[in-house]
Image (tube, grey):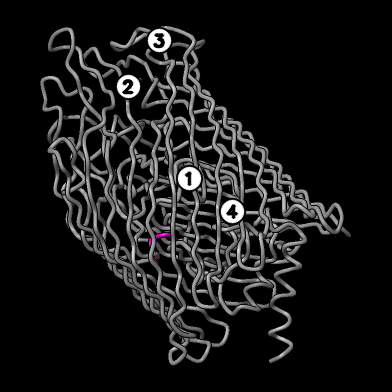
Amino acid sequence: MTKTKLLIPSLLLGTAISGLANAQTIDYGMMESIFGEPVTASATGKPQRASEAPVSMEIIGSEEIRRSGAKDIPQLLMRVSGVQVQRPFIGRADVSIRGYNKPYANRLLVLINGRQVLSDAFGQVNWENLPISMNEVRQIEVVKGPNSSLFGFNAESGVINIITFSAMNDDIDSIQVKAGTQEHKQVDFIHTAQFDKQAVRVSMAEVESDGFDTGSLLNQDNENALANRRANVDYEWQVNDKSNLRVQGSYANTEAHSLIGYLSTFRPTNQDTSSIQANYSLASDMGLWGVNVYRIADNLTTSNIGYENDLTVAKVENLFKVNTDHSVRLAVEYRYNSLKRQIVGDADSKFDYDLYAPSAMWDWKVSDNLSWTNSARYDMVNFGRDSVPTFGPYTNLDLYDRTIEEFSFNSGLSYKLSNTDTLRASVSRGLHIPSLIELGSSQSLTGLGVTAGFHGNPGLETERIMSYELGWDKKLPQIDGNFRSAIFMQKAENVLGETINITGGPTTVSYTFDNKGDSSTWGIELGLDGEYDNWLRWGVNYTYLDTQDDTSSLYYEEAQAQHQLSLLGGFDYNQWEFDADLHYISDSTQQYTYLGGIPSPLTATEDIDGYFVLNARAGYKWNDKVDLAIEGYNLVDQHREWMHARSATGSDAGGNTLGRSVLATLTYKY
C-alpha cells in the first residue's frame, strides 16, 4: 500500500516534466491503471481522475469503444447521457449536448489531440470526414455544458475531446476488414514504429457503402451514398528530458449524400480536408510551456455550391504552480479564418476574420476535500470582406468590417464528501460567435423553380448561453460501479436561426440568418453502471430536457425530444464477447424551412414518433492476433430521425428512413 501511495505522486511529477502542458503526451494507459479509472488533463492541464474534474465529463475508453462495435463516433456517443444524436443519412450525423440539435448543428467543439475538426465555415462537424480510425482512439472525453473559456472557440454547448493513442507509448498495429449490408466495404490499416526517442504511427482507411432504401421519400437512388478515404500520420520525438515534439498530418476525402445548410435540397457532396499540426511542450523553471500550431484546408463542392475554408491557429500556454495548492494556466490564441469561392460571391471573393483571445485558468485546492477552478477568456474578432456580395441586400462593404468582442467564463466547485461521494457545483458562460457563412455568405441558387439564393447577415449578434449545474457522483464498490447525476439550467440569448425573406415580388426568395430571440432549458441526467465478477457489465442512463422558447420564431421547444433512455450490457463467455446498447428517444415535432417554397408554404412541421435504436456486437477471439465479430446497427426499428417535407413542399429535402445494418468484421493484430 505504501508503494502505491508513493508511486502516484511520482507518476504525476514525471508526467509534468515530460510535457504536462501538452495534455496529449500523457501516458493515459499507465495513469488509468494506477488510479483505477479514466484520467483526463484537458480541463486544467494536469492529470486528474475523471470523477474529480471541475467540469461535467464522461469518458469512453478504448475497451468500451472496441466492444461497442460502433461504426463511427456519433453511434458511440449515443451511449452518453445528455448527448443527442440524429441521422439524416447512412454516413451523416448531427450531434449536440443538452439539446438544441439541428441539421448541421454548430454549437459543439470537437477536438482531435487539441486540433479542432469542425468545419469552421459554418461551425458544423462532418463526422463522416474525420481523418482517424476508431481503432486508434485511446479515449473520448464528453464535456457537458458551456466551456468556451476552458477549451476554446465554439464550445458553447460542450466539447467532444478525442484523444488517440500515443505513438511513443502505445504500439498499435492492425489490419481490419468490414463487409455487410448496404454493400458496405471497409479496410483500416494502422502501423506504429517505435525507436529510441522517436515514434510514428500511420493509419489509412477506405469506406464505400450504399445508403438505406430511400423508397418514395427522396427522388434519389441509394447507390454510392458514402465513399471515404482517409490517412493520418502521428510523429512524436522526446527531444530531451524536459521537452517533447508531436507533429500530425491528416487527409480525408468524402463523397456522400448530404444536406447543405439547414434542411436544404438533398444533393451529393464532395469534401476534401487536410491538416498539419505541431505541438511542442517544455518543462522549465517558469512552469510548463505548450505551443500548439495547426492549419486546416477544407474544400466542399456540390452541384451548385462550393467553398474553400482555410484556418490557421496558433496557441501558447504556460501552466505553473504558485504554491502546492494553486495551479495557474495562462494562454493566448490567434486564429485566421477565410472563406472563398461561390459561397461568398464568386470564385475570387473572400470573407475572413482575425481572432485574438487571451485566457486564464486558476485551480485552487482549498483543502483535501474541496477544490475550486475558475477560468476566463476574452475573444476579439475582426471581420472583413474584399468584394461586394453578388446576392442579398447588404451591398455596403463597411457593414462587414466589424469587430466582435466577447467574454466567457467557467467557475466550478468540487467537494469530496467521502471516499465514494463527490459533489459538484458550477456556473459558466459560453459563446457562439456567428460563423463566416452566417455573417458573410452570398450566393444565388438555380434549379429551385424560383429566383432564390442565400446570404449572410453582417449585423448578427453573438449567441450567448449561461449555465448553472449541480452534480453528485457516487462510487459503488458493492457493484463495482458508479452512480452519476446532474441537474442543470441554461439560458440562451440571441439564438441564431434561419429566416426566409420575400423580396422583389413573390417570385424571389432569400434564405438568411437572424437572432431569433431567447430560449431556456432545464434538464436532469442520471446514470448507473456496474460490473460483476469481471465478465458481466451493464449500465443505464436517462436524460430529461425541458426547453422553453421566448418567441414563436424559435422551434426548439417542440423539436427537442424530452426523454432519452439508454440500456447498455455485455458479457464474456470463454472466447466470446457479447455487447448491446438499446436507446429510446421520445417523440418531437420538427420544423422545416424551404427556400424554394413559393407558392408552397415557406415552413412546415412534422411529428417524429418516438423510436428505438438497438446496436449489438458478437465477437470471437480466434487467437491472440485474430478477432472475428458481427456488428449490427439499428436492428429493431426502421425510422426517421429528421423530418422530410416532401408532402408540404414537393422538395427532395429532409432525412432518409434509417434501416438496419449488419457488418462482419475481421481484425488482425501484428
Magenta part of the protein: which range? Answer: 75-79
Q: CA distance from mark 3 to mark 4?
A: 45 Å
Q: Which residue carries the number 1 mark? A: 128
Measured along the vertical axis of the image, is residue 277 above or below residue 505?
below
Whether residue 78 is in magenta: the answer is yes
Q: Earlier in the sequence, mark 4 or mark 2?
A: 4
Residue 459 is tagged as: 2
Q: Earlier in the sequence, mark 3 or mark 1?
A: 1
Of labels 3 and 4, earlier in sequence is: 4
Q: Is residue 239 left or right of residue 23?
A: right
Which secondary structure lies at badge 1?
Answer: helix
169 up-or-down from 89: above or below: below
Task: Give the amino acid at mark 3.
Answer: Asp
The residue under label 3 is 398
Task: Please name the amino acid that badge 1 sits on.
Answer: Glu
Q: Bin the neighbour count of mark 4 within 10 Å (Cα to Cα): few under 14, some 14-19, many 20 and up.
A: many
The nearer-to-camera label among 1 and 2 is: 2
Q: Mark 1 packing: few (<14 Cα in 10 Å), some, or many (20+)?
A: many
